[in-house]
Image (cartoon, coloured by chain):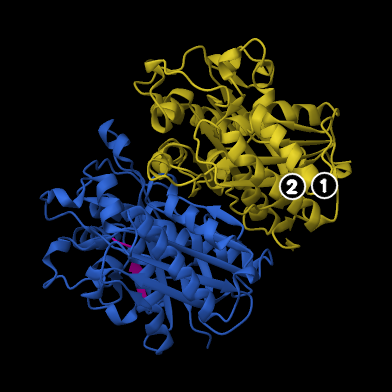
Chain colours: A yellow, B blue
């Protein structure tokens, strides 16, 4: 149900019935390794291309989630997914394997919450009983497409981020046990003129700040409402800008409550290659559906707001000297009290 | 509300409050020219790239639709859009101009009905009062990306289709005058192993047949239910295959009731360059929101089913020897009696 200008409230409280996360070798070395359902020691996953490895991860995540929910694929009405690759082929090929009616989405790294917000709406409005929603990214496939093949060993500036190899999915339902989805705020495009594809954090931070501000306005709440607010993948640079922007707008976002998935997934001291932090569709998806939901489960957190951010550029739009249009979608998840 | 396995019924009957269609020079020579709101004599639209021209068309269509609905952009809660270009940049850049909270979609040429089905759900479930939904394609931008730059003058086999230069959008609302959206059926991926990107019609036809069959099953109806059933862009080859497949499955789809947007938009005799017919996201969007809705308005038709089809390949998936996963989404539109 519409709330305010750009938000939804879900009175029927759709349940996140199960989640699954799959990661790659670099994620296996990070501090959140234990929060993954499946970790691969090899980037290829036995496939003959990185793109096919990305598809395989997505298929594995879906299979695990269906199994954990005690369901069969046929029980699920809709599959909502997207990723970073051209024409979102990893998602569409996974949808072929699943044979579940499918909505392809493109929100770059915001797709995790774009798909979760829609899944919640479907269930809340009785338009589905079970919805599978998720996203994935594969470091080598994404770097090749957006920047350079990783085999080149190209150098990057310290503002650049490391694309997560991972897939994260959730099954949302009208029944069952699990945390519930209570609210969502859909972002609009914010573009402050940044055109450097090696500084996505700075480009995306204003979109995150815009959506958090809109969320607080639409629900007439402040940060006090949540135990944790996590942006998608702003990394070190974007995190700092987001905090500063919120302060400038007079909206308090204390640093002990606000975190960023791109700062959590890797050990920023030990895994130096990640530079400013993690990024990619798989970043907020695996951190949210793995780490953060595990913290909810353990009762360390009860009410969180996930703000997945996306940079909607293409290599061609960059070459044509366009700046980077960014977006952020927020979804509130809470434990049933 | 969920109906059957993969369909929605919309008891609140969301209204298509206004529509707008924009076309290019080749569409201006076609038999449906009079059904466009705006036709351009030049493929560039005054822009310095075909991609930017695609964005401009989308912006123009949105502006016209908002104006025709007697609304301001700020009245509209959500913008649902996608297109064929990598990272759907024409849609996302248009969303930047509009500044309306935005869901990026990717369903290739099925996006027209993917976005309309979601818009109807938003309004039906009181999750929005006004939703803007649409899609676009630009011949020269799409051909360059998926096949060859048109300047090469490459030859094509007769099974190939002509990408429509056009944008079509609709504003869906809970109030106002106009035809209503009553049902939708969401397709699953169907892939019969065809891998020839110059024969999309053959690849997509089984997906269209699958969705039409599912629609008839979920609502327990036959073709008698509709005055017209139009697939998206199967062209000559796909049309024939779809008819044959339906017959094989024992579901009647008489040729005097079934048509294809790709066969309507160009004069197949005079505009020989189109080969097997029109295609691209702009095909079903402009034909539906222009020609078919005008026929509803004039009372020549009262109840139609639009089945937009999409081929979810990428140039890279083709190079990696994958076949073409296809999908079709169906939406029923009818006059208020």
Q: Would residue A80 be seen by someone viewing this image from the given angle? A: yes
- Can residue B229 be found in the magenta stretch? yes
Q: Chain for mark 2?
A: A
Q: Residues within 10 Å of mark 2 (few under 14, many from 20)?
A: many
Q: Secondary structure at mark 2?
A: helix
Left or right, residue A167 beside residue A11: left
Q: Which mark is residue A212?
A: 2
Q: Position of residue A140 (x, y in %)?
A: 44, 23
Question: Between A229 and B313, which is closer to the camera in this rendering?
Answer: A229
User: Which is closer to the viewer, label 2 or label 1?
Assistant: 1
- Can residue B153 be found in the magenta stretch? no
Q: Secondary structure at mark 1?
A: loop
Question: Between A318 and B112, which is closer to the camera in this rendering?
Answer: A318
- The residues colored magenta run B228-233
Left or right, residue B255 beside residue B215: left
Q: Main secondary structure of the magenta part?
A: strand
Which quadrant is home to the C terminus of chain A? top right
Q: Chain for mark 1?
A: A
Q: Position of residue B203 (x, y in %)?
A: 27, 49
Q: Which residue is tagged 1?
A: A251
In the rendered image of this protein, does residue A55 appear above or below residue A133? above
């Amino acid at each position: 149900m519409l709330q305010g200008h750009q938000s939804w409230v879900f009175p029927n409280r759709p349940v996140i019935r199960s989640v699954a996360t799959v990661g790659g070798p670099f994620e296996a070395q990070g501090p959140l390794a234990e929060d993954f359902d499946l970790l691969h020691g090899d980037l290829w996953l036995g496939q003959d291309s990185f793109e096919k490895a990305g598809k395989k991860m997505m298929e594995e995540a879906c299979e695990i989630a269906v199994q954990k929910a005690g369901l069969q694929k046929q029980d699920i009405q809709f599959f909502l997914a997207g990723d970073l690759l051209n024409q979102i082929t990893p998602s569409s090929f996974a949808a072929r394997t699943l044979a579940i009616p499918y909505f392809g989405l493109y929100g770059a790294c915001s797709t995790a919450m774009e798909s979760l917000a829609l899944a919640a709406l479907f269930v809340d409005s009785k338009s589905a009983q079970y919805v599978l929603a998720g996203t994935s990214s594969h470091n080598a496939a994404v770097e090749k497409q957006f920047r350079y093949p990783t085999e080149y060993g190209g150098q990057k500036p310290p503002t650049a981020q490391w694309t997560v190899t991972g897939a994260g999915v959730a099954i949302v339902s009208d029944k069952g046990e699990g945390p519930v989805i209570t609210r969502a705020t859909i972002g609009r495009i914010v573009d402050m003129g940044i055109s450097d594809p090696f500084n996505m954090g700075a480009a995306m931070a204003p979109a995150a700040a815009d959506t958090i501000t809109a969320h607080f306005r639409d629900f007439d709440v402040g940060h006090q409402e949540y135990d944790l607010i996590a942006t998608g993948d702003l990394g070190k640079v974007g995190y700092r800008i987001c905090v500063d922007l919120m302060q400038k707008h007079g909206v308090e976002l204390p640093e002990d409550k606000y975190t960023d998935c791109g700062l959590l997934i890797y050990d920023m001291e030990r895994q130096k290659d990640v530079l400013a932090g993690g990024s990619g569709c798989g970043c907020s998806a695996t951190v949210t559906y793995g780490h953060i939901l595990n913290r909810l489960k353990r009762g360390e957190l009860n009410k969180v707001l996930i703000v997945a951010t996306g940079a909607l550029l293409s290599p061609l739009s960059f070459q044509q000297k366009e700046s980077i249009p960014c977006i952020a979608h927020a979804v509130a998840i809470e434990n049933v009290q």
